[in-house]
Image (cartoon, rainbow, N blue to C red):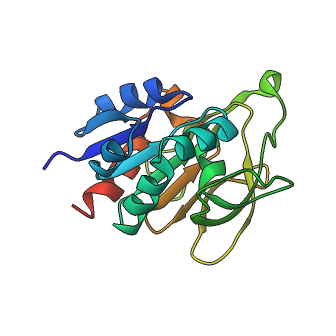
Amino acid sequence: MTPRIGILALQGDFAEHLQAFSALDCQPVPVKRPEEVLSCQGLVIPGGESTTIGKLCQRFGVDEAIMQLHQRGAPIWGTCAGMILLAKEIEGNDQWRLGLMDIAVRRNAFGRQVDSFATDLAIAGIADGPVRAVFIRAPYVTRVWGEAETLATFEDNIVMVRQDKLLATAFHPELTDDRRIQQYFLNMVCSII
């Protein structure tokens, strides 16, 4: 069975995720409605504006569909804004979030758009050397607890975490040609189907 990977396409850089996953053995599809979300074996919540994505999730009922997908045990990966939406806590902010991961995050932790940068990261569970990581107005994780585990750090800041079937990256793997993190997530999906 070829896994169907939903890319939440309400706002943000979903097109880049669709292109990245199209190079792998899966069926990436843009999803905007609850029934589309629920038709997938895995879901990616892309980077963008977390407040806007959250409001659109609520407006279109996608928030409830994501929670149902999570309850079914389907893997969910949040990048940048997606990491913020997966977090249980957002420092100094009470915006709506899914609140699924045992992490606290700081929004725009590395600065504004002009402070964007790329670096090489060693990531636990990813073989064959470091991964190029692109940070754009990125958050980072200030605290992990419970079942959440740190997979990568940059300058002592946590930038990639996993909690069972949940994955979150502060950076944008879809903006490079390296598909190892996408394959890592796809392996999470394949382990349940």
The answer to whether any part of residue 127 appears in the image is yes
Residue at position x 55%, y 29% in the image: 11
Residue 41: image location, x then y, percent: 29, 53
The answer to whether any part of residue 125 appears in the image is no
Residue at position x 52%, y 36% in the image: 173
Instruction: Say whether residue 30 is left or right of residue 102.
Output: left
Residue at position x 65%, y 44% in the image: 170
Q: Residue furthest bottom?
A: 146
Q: Relative to the observer, which residue lies in front, 51 or 15?
A: 51
Residue 77: image location, x then y, percent: 48, 50
Instruction: Say whether residue 72 is left or right of residue 169.
Output: left
Residue at position x 46%, y 69% in the image: 164
Residue 121: image location, x then y, percent: 62, 44
Quarter that holds the C terminus: bottom left
Q: Relative to the observer, which residue lies in front, 87 or 163?
A: 87
Q: Relative to the observer, which residue lies in front, 65 or 189?
A: 65
Residue 35: image location, x then y, percent: 31, 46
> How many circles with numbers are drawn on the protein?
0
Q: Is residue 87 above or below residue 31?
A: below
Q: Residue furthest left?
A: 1
Instruction: Say whether residue 80 is left or right of residue 174.
Output: right
Q: Residue furthest top?
A: 114
Residue 119, quarter of picture? top right
